[in-house]
Image (cartoon, coloured by chain):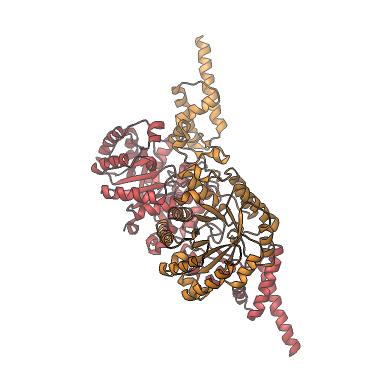
Chain colours: A orange, B red
Amino acid sequence: MSLEQFNIIESTLREGEQFVNAFFTLDQKIEIARLLDAFGVEYLELTTPCASPQSEIDCRAIASLGLRARTLTHTRCAMEDVRRAVGTGVSGVDVVIGTSSYLREFSHGKSIAEIIGMAQEVVGWLKTQSVEVRFSTEDSLRSEPEDLYRVYAAVDQMGVDRVGIADTVGIGNPRQIYELVSGLHRRVRAGIEFHGHNDTGCAIANAFAALEAGASYIDTSVLGIGERNGITALGGLIARLYAVSPALVGKYNLPLLLELDRLVAGLVRVDIPFNNYVTGFSAFTHKAGIHAKAVLNNPSTYEVLRPEDFGLTRYIHIAHRLTGWNAVRYRAGQLGLELSDAQVRAVTDQIKRLSDERELALDEVDGLLMAAIQSVQSREEISA
Amino acid sequence: MSLEQFNIIESTLREGEQFVNAFFTLDQKIEIARLLDAFGVEYLELTTPCASPQSEIDCRAIASLGLRARTLTHTRCAMEDVRRAVGTGVSGVDVVIGTSSYLREFSHGKSIAEIIGMAQEVVGWLKTQSVEVRFSTEDSLRSEPEDLYRVYAAVDQMGVDRVGIADTVGIGNPRQIYELVSGLHRRVRAGIEFHGHNDTGCAIANAFAALEAGASYIDTSVLGIGERNGITALGGLIARLYAVSPALVGKYNLPLLLELDRLVAGLVRVDIPFNNYVTGFSAFTHKAGIHAKAVLNNPSTYEVLRPEDFGLTRYIHIAHRLTGWNAVRYRAGQLGLELSDAQVRAVTDQIKRLSDERELALDEVDGLLMAAIQSVQSREEISA
């Protein structure tokens, strides 16, 4: 079961740089790289040195930081590109070429036989260098499976370390990914990497399906940033694996996730989405009375992620019309107020009536509970 | 194949009201309901009239608007609740009860036999009313499948219209959902509904897996709002099905999606996430040179969703270090400038060098192209 031995290829510094708002200086790239390294990702993928003069400087600089994470750069399947990539001192080179009929017709114009020929030259040379070699097709989901398997079998025979499947346009669904990766797993001895875009909302589920089918390398980026609406988000993948078993992600420093999301969101000038996995502001909020009651009894009732494990806390919202008396009783307890069940139910009705008219704040709820206890005390005084 | 006959049960006005920031007045609820109706969803699910006095008024008001969409309300499996639900005039009642060991221990404390007994009373009565009846378990993914199937078989025999599977905590993954729904599909004649939370990033993929396995009703909310980080987003589900075939979602008014996302985001005071399906600002942006080149040749190369079908437009970003000369040549063409390939390549190098130092704006790129054409013209004048 490869879920136990998966690796993250963190591509904020490659795919993430393709996000429309991204412009990272070298200092910012180093800050991101160091924080990802502290979090514990196994690989950092960097923009090709062929993109621009500064990209080459950046690639060299990050490769020489002495991080625990291995560094990779991502290049076209061309000798000039991979020579320059190796020259930067990275630990590995991720070679990519499009195999779909779309890319063959509208992008590079090569046949499958030509692609294999190019791969032989490029991979053959890379194997003489002491670097890891990954060979990936692009737009794999819209390629003919037989074409794909021919290319992968050829590069597998050349001894590549990893073969990559890329859902470049975000069209794949989990059952397709599972089938494609399973078929590949039977055919190659190389490790399998999955890279998935999120245009149709399946990037996390597809990455998970790939792992279930035998992949052991998943590409991520912080907040999922990348071309268009991006790829598998680092935090989302972590959440998915944590839900299977927290031990699967025990090798990572989970409380750094919030810092990573905040850092990258700030640098690319976006807000962390309100509904982001783990770090969105609503991720650990509970509202409906029936949820609040059960979470107070046992948080696992409605929480598959323990916020404490991510250095976060839950929030139970009680000042609204969907509230329930159990949650209100809990709040009375927090305030040290001893009210009977009947009294708590009466305050709950007051909260519902008031919040039907306008939004209530927690201190107003507290005020209602205090008023209830005072009316109890004054009745006791009268009867005393 | 149920993908062709699926229905959306739009729950912004029930699950969405459980989002921590949601407070909808009746007027706002009506605005949301009318816009969802214009979009074309088949059902609107409303907060139970038992939640508060205003919730009952709202439920009656929306049920009597005369919308094309059928109205449902969502209640506990209790006689007092369903009587009140039917009294509001809705077209159907969605009954729910927890079956997981967590909910049985920490929430309602009932055994499976007791649950079936309660269902018999409640469903038996509802069947005497002229309403649709849905019976759902809660936290279905952490329930024993045998327990679930016993309950579903019992209510199916009572003649419920739909049975519901709810991944209340967002723990399910697509292969699990597919298996659970397939098993249910073999056992009941009722329609199957799926409700899935998104804590671990699978809400869209799980809904799709449910449809593949024989479900024909999916719960959604606008932007996915709901308890915690929410459920299957309406726009995300649409994008997923569109990727299979645009005809599957041809029955909806797709350009209203942006208006819906904007309306609800405004009412609950959040921004539309930057990476939201279809309507996030980055959904149709292209940046890397190799992507831009191919998209200019044929947008389908890197786009699985046609922005035009959603009333939106694509944006090709060229003023950055990852740009390519084909995209720059296209821009020159847009400006009516006739430059040779060598000249366009020279301008591309200038763009890369400048954008290595700082962020460039499009008008600066245009300036470089204009300068290139002027230098051509002045050379021509000198030689004339």
Left or right placement of residue B283 versus residue B331 in this view? left
Hey, which quadrant is residue B334 in on the image? bottom right
The answer to whether any part of residue A35 appears in the image is: yes
Residue A239 picture location, percent across and down? 50, 46
Residue lying furthest front in this view? A128
The answer to whether any part of residue B68 appears in the image is: no
Residue B16 picture location, percent across and down? 46, 45
Residue lying furthest top in this view? A384
Residue B17 picture location, percent across and down? 46, 42
* Along the viewing direction, whichever of A64 and B30 lies nearer the viewer: A64
Left or right placement of residue A266 versus residue A379 in this view? right
* Along the viewing direction, whichever of B170 and A255 lies nearer the viewer: A255
Residue A56 picture location, percent across and down? 67, 64
* Residue at position x 46%, y 30% in the image: A297
Hey, which quadrant is residue B324 in on the image? bottom right
* Residue at position x 57%, y 69% in the image: A76
User: Taking A367 as reference, is A125 above or below it?
Assistant: below
Residue lying furthest bottom in this view? B384
* Along the viewing direction, whichever of B194 and A151 lies nearer the viewer: A151
Number of labelled discs?
0
User: Taking B25 as reference, is B254 above or below it?
Assistant: below
